[in-house]
Amino acid sequence: MLADVSITITATSGVDEGDKGLGAGVITTSQEVGRAFGLGVLTAVAIAHTGALQDGISWGLRTGVAFLAAALVVVVAGQDAEG
């Protein structure tokens, strides 16, 4: 959430002036859907592995770190493709 403004600015920087509202809407929608989906997945993983509460939380955090690592790879690959 802290990076929402900078992500929107970056994502709409190469868009025509008349299409910036649409671009910002697409970015915002994908952020909201991603957050809802991500929270659902992390919760499902944590609940599935909750023999002990600590184990479930640990699995949920590991899954979150895996998603973060995958997102980082996508971002770096996207930067290499542009440059």
Image (tube, rainbow, N blue to C red):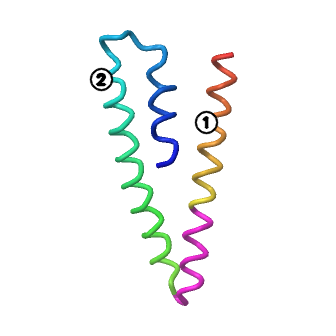
Residue 46 left/right relative to 21: right
Question: Is 3 within the magenta?
Answer: no
Give the image quarter of residue 74.
top right
> Residue 17 — which label?
none
| Vertical position of residue 55 compared to residue 1: above or below | below
Question: Is 53 within the magenta?
Answer: yes
Q: CA distance from mark 1 to mark 2?
A: 23 Å
> Which residue in the protein does label 1 denote?
74
Our reading of the magenta stretch's main secondary structure is helix
| Vertical position of residue 62 compared to residue 29: above or below | below
The residue sitting at 33% across, 39% down in the picture is 29
Amino acid type of the residue tagged 1 in the rendering: Val
Amino acid type of the residue tagged 2 in the rendering: Leu
Residue 73 location (% of width, % of height): 66, 39
Give whichever of 13, 73 is nearer the camera: 13
Residue 80 left/right relative to 10: right
> Which residue in the protein does label 2 denote?
22
Residue 60 location (% of width, % of height): 54, 70
The residue sitting at 49% across, 70% down in the picture is 45
Residue 38 location (% of width, % of height): 44, 56
| Vertical position of residue 38 compared to residue 16: above or below | below
Give the magenta part as a residue range: 51-63
Residue 12 location (% of width, % of height): 44, 21
Q: Provide the secondary structure element on which disc 1 rests.
A: helix
In contact (CB < 8 Å): disc 1 and disc 2: no
Of the image marks 1 and 2, the number of the one nearer the N terminus: 2
Mark 2: give few (<14), some (14-19) or many (20+) Cα within 10 Å. Answer: few
The residue sitting at 30% across, 23% down in the picture is 21
Residue 8 left/right relative to 57: left
Give whichever of 1, 79 is nearer the camera: 1
Mark 1: give few (<14), some (14-19) or many (20+) Cα within 10 Å. Answer: few
Q: Provide the secondary structure element on which disc 2 rests.
A: helix
